[in-house]
Image (cartoon, rainbow, N blue to C red):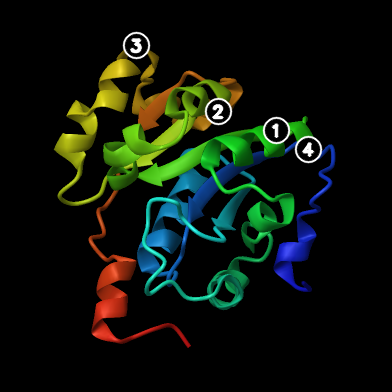
Amino acid sequence: MSGISSTIPVRGDRRRTRIGLLGGSFNPIHEGHIQLACRALRQLALDQVWLLVSPGNPLKPVAGMAPQRQRLEQARRRVAPFGRRIIATDIESRMGTRYTVDTITQLRRRFPCARFVWLMGADGLAQMARWRRWRRIMQLVPVAILPRPGYNPAALRGLVARYMASARRPAREAPVLTRYGGCAWVFLPAPQNAISATEIRASGHRPA
C-alpha cells in the first residue's frame, strides 16, 4: 500500500529514534487520539509517534468495525499535517501480529536501535489486565499513561497499576522514559478529553 504507511519498512531498519506507539482500532480516529499523540511528542521528547491501526482488536466486537483500509486512510489524512512526526501505519497487519505483546516483540526485533514507549489513555490501563501477557508487555517497553475522564481512579487502583507500583516513575522523568528498557511507567498530567470513537459512531458522524 502506498503512502505514509510505507515509510515504515516491515523488515525494519537501524534507525536511532525515540518512538511512541499508540495502538488502536481508530474506528474512527478523533481529536482525542491527536491530542494524546501531540502531548506524548512534547512531554516524552519523542521523535515520532506511530499510530498502529489494528486489523482487529481481540477485545472489541467485529460488528460496527470499519475495514482496516478505510480506518487507515482516515487516520493518514488526519495526521498528514504533522508530516513524519505522527505516522499512521498498518505495520501490524503486514507483520502478521494481532496482540500487543507480539507487535512490540516484533518491532523491537526489527528496529533494534529504536527506543520505543507504549502510549495509552487511562481507560487502556484500567482494562490492561485483560490483555494477553500484559506483564510481559510491561517488561518489554516503558509505558506512558495519559488521563481520561471517568477512568483515572479505577486505572490507578487497578491490578496492573498495583502490580507495577514500584516501577512507576514521577512525571518529571517523562523526557527520559525511553531510556528504560521496560518495567517503567509514568502517569502524565494533561488536559482531559472525553470524546470516544463509540460516541462518534453513535452520532452517525465520521471523518471525511
Q: Which residue is mark 3?
A: 166
Label 2's element? loop
Q: Residues within 10 Å of mark 4 (few under 14, many from 20)?
A: some
Q: Which residue is rendered at x = 38% and y = 29% of the image?
A: 186
The amino acid type of the residue labelled 3 equals: Ser
For marks 1 and 3, give the one nearer the viewer. 1
Visible in this render: residue 188?
no
**Quarter location, residue 82:** bottom right
Q: Which residue is mark 1?
A: 108
* Residue 35 makes an appearance in the image: yes
Element type at marker 1? helix
User: Gap in Å between the C-alphas at discs 1 and 3?
Assistant: 24 Å
Label located before the other in sequence (1 or 3): 1
What whole-number distance in Å separates the C-alpha atoms at marks 1 and 4? 6 Å
Q: Are marks 1 and 4 in contact (CB under 8 Å)?
A: yes
Does dot 3 land on a helix, a strand or a loop? Answer: helix
Q: Are marks 4 and 3 in contact (CB under 8 Å)?
A: no
Give the numbered dot on residue 15. none
Asked whether, in this view, residue 66 is left or right of residue 130, the answer is right
In the image, what residue occupies the spot 18% across and 52% down?
149
Asked if labels 3 and 1 touch by Cβ distance under 8 angstroms, the answer is no
Residue bearing the label numbered 4: 110
- For residue 141, which numbered disc appears in the image? 2
- Identified by mark 4, the residue type is Arg
Seen in the image, is 68 located left or right of residue 28? right
Check contact, mark 2 vs mark 1: CB within 8 A: yes
Give x and y (percent) for residue 64: 38, 75
Label 2 amino acid?
Answer: Val
Q: Nearer the viewer, residue 46 or 161?
A: 161
Q: Tell me if mark 2 has few (under 14), some (14-19) or many (20+) residues whose alpha carbon lies within 10 angstroms of its own.
A: many
Sequence-wise first label, 4 or 2: 4
**x 84%, y 42%: residue:** 13
